[in-house]
Structure formats: structure tokens, C-alpha cells
Amino acid sequence: MERVYTNGQEFDTIDFTDTGLPVGDYEDCRFLNCNFSNTDLGNTHFSDCIFSGCNLSMAALVKTAFRDVRFRDSKMLGLHFEHCNPFLFAATFENCILNFSSFYTRVLKKTTFRHSSLIEADFTEADLTGAVFPDCDLAGATFENTILEKADFRTALHYTINPGLNKIKKAMFSQSGLAGLLAQYDIIIE
């Protein structure tokens, strides 16, 4: 099957659940209000693309490349980013629902997760050096053997991070978030 190359195209309100997105390289494309739920996006490469108002829930991402991709106002439940192509992986997330998604072992240095829901997300063994989480809900998110150096959790909510199991040097937290760093001690903070 031949790969397609698409540059600068806008895809608006397309349901790819039946037809699928042709495997190929998409550069500087905009996907607006498209439905990719349960779609196989494997071996597809996205560079400098924007996904806005899309549903990518449970999409298969085996060897999918996201290079400087922006996700806005999108539903992205249960995605396995650890299956993505790691080469030049770079993405930002704004006002997205990433609940139950996995970033296991993913390098996410300086990644921005803004106003997003990351409930039960898995960041085990990920590198989140310099990542920022403004106004993100991290209830039940897993951080284990995660590099969180210089990460910014000052306005993040509901996280539980064990400093003994993660590298948190120079990470930033608010006073109100300290309970999330002490949860493993089962102490009462007033």
C-alpha cells in the first residue's frame, strides 16, 4: 500500500471511523472536529499539525509519529502514547481529556498540558523534565520512576506523587499541593 503525502490541508468535521485516515505523512494540516475514535492511526506521521475539537479516543497509535503537534479541545481517552514513534516526538495539549491514557517511558521534556484532564493517566518511567501542568486534573495519575525535574505542578490538582519513587529536583509545587507529596505517609494536614 502506497503512503500518501498531504501538506497544508484542512479536514473539517470528517468521521474517519468507517473509512480510516489513509496511512501517510501529514504536514502542516489542520483536523477540525474530526472523529478518529477506535481508528487505526498506526504508521501515520503528523508534523506541525493541529487537532482541534477532535475525538481520538482509543485510536491505535502503533508507530504513529507526532512531531510538533498541537491538540486542543479534544477527547483522547485511553490512548497509548508509548506505542508512538519516539523519534522527535513533541506535542502540546490544551483543554483536552486524556483520562486513562498512557505515557509509559515517553520522553515529554518541556511538554505543556494546559487545562487538561489526566485522570488515571500513566506516566510511569516517563521523562517529564520541565513539563508544565497548569490547571490540570491529575487524580489517580501514576508517577513511578518518573523524571519530574523542573516540572511545574503549581496549579495542578489532585495529584499524588511519591518523592521517594520519582526524581523531583527543582520541581515546582504550590503549598496547597503539598498534601499530594505526603499522601504515602497517611498523615493529616490541616
Image: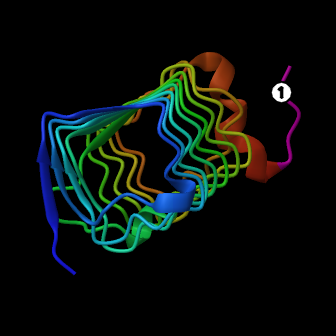
Q: How many marks?
A: 1
How far across and down, in percent of the image, does residue 177 sit? 65, 26
> Does residue 186 appear to the left or right of 65 in the view shown?
right
Q: Nearer the viewer, residue 91 or 109?
A: 91
| Label 1 CA crowd tier, 10 Å (few <14, some 14–19, many 20+) | few
Q: Residue at x 40, y 64 (%)?
A: 41
Indicate the quadrant where residue 187 lies.
Answer: top right
Q: Is residue 55 above or below residue 83?
A: above
Q: Nearer the viewer, residue 83 or 140?
A: 83
Q: Nearer the viewer, residue 28 or 78?
A: 28
**Residue 14 located within the stretch drawn in magenta:** no
Q: Amino acid at mark 1?
A: Ile
Q: Residue at x 48, y 21 (%)?
A: 134
How far across and down, in percent of the image, does residue 68 sit? 20, 41
How far across and down, in percent of the image, does residue 105 sit? 39, 68
Q: Residue at x 27, y 64 (%)?
A: 44
Q: Which residues are magenta?
A: 186-190
Which residue is labeled 1 in the image? 189
> Does residue 162 appear to the left or right of 11 in the view shown?
right
